[in-house]
Image (tube, helix red, strand yellow):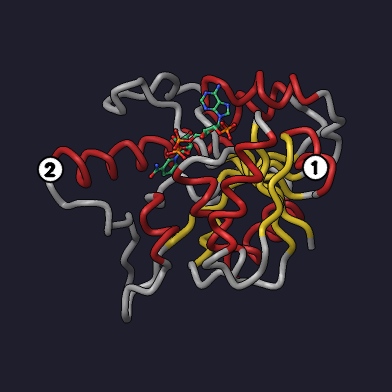
Amino acid sequence: MNISILGTGNVGSGLAKTFSKTDHVIYLGSRDQATAQAKAKEMNTETTRPITGVTTAEAIDKSKVIFLAVPFDGAIELLKSANVDLTDKIIVDVTNPLTEDFMNLTVGHDTSAAEEIQSAFPGAHVVKAFNTVFAQILHEGPDFGSQNVPVYVASDKECAQSAVMKLVEATGFEAINSGILKNARYLEPMAAMNIQFGYVLGLGTQIAPAWISR
Ligand SMILES: NC(=O)c1ccc[n+]([C@@H]2O[C@H](COP(=O)([O-])OP(=O)(O)OC[C@H]3O[C@@H](n4cnc5c(N)ncnc54)[C@H](OP(=O)(O)O)[C@@H]3O)[C@@H](O)[C@H]2O)c1
């Protein structure tokens, strides 16, 4: 299957690296094609399967599944400006709606980044996923010994949710069914707490929030 990733930053390149280890065909989309091509070329020296750098519009056009790895405050505008029909596309929202200093959320309680994206593109199927995984873990891989790195997957569209859960499982991360898209209201604050643990309380970025049970 073709998978497109929008954003060539820490998370976009980390997702590209993660999915290049699977059987899927990876397109890395940027606002600037030369940036995407340069990033793909740099990454292709160390990836198993080649990544192709393309424009945002081409990336959306090529794949049914599109990962949104850009700042939330530019995400809706980016998708609109590409001017490509998003009907029935699966948009995997990896964003966290954070202030510039990463210390606060800009939306929450009665909505979430994921729900805002869904209401901007009602014909698309938005799936929240990977927002609680630090980019460094994407780059270094999900091997934490006997522990799994959870990826919480929430959506209102069951078939889109299960398709994304399958993609997650193919990468070695653990897909956790996290219910409806509204639950992004809870997943996004989880990522904010993860940032507090990682950057404020000194635990670093080799951590991930997990549920225990018995
Ligand atoms: N860093 C983490 O550990 C982490 C973990 C989970 C979730 N997230 C979320 O994932 C998203 C990406 O984070 P990141 O750390 O990869 O950020 P980043 O390194 O700053 O990269 C963001 C990329 O988004 C693209 N972009 C598109 N529209 C943009 C705009 N209006 N302004 C700035 N960049 C724009 C840029 O790529 P082009 O120039 O190629 O278009 C840029 O390189 C954010 O929403 C963040 O909250 C981050």
Residue 92 in the image, given as x and y percentages of width and height: 63, 44
**Residue 157, placed above or below residue 147:** above
**Residue 48, placed above or below residue 185:** below
Amino acid identity at mark 1: Lys
> Is 6 on the left or on the right of 121, as rendered?
left
Residue 17 in the image, given as x and y percentages of width and height: 54, 60
* SS for dot 2: loop
Pointer 1: residues within 10 angstroms few (<14), some, or many (20+)?
some
- Label 2, on which residue? 201
Residue toward you, 48 or 200:
48
Query: Who's the residue at 82% across and 34% down the image?
Result: 86
Query: Who's the residue at 36% across and 54% down the image?
Result: 136
- Label 1, on which residue? 89
- Find out if the beta carbon at label 2 lies less than 8 Å from the nearest ligand 1 atom: no
> Is 140 on the left or on the right of 23, as rendered?
left
What is the quadrant of the N terminus in the image? bottom right
Amino acid identity at mark 2: Leu
> Is 43 on the left or on the right of 155, as rendered?
left
Residue 62 in the image, given as x and y percentages of width and height: 83, 47
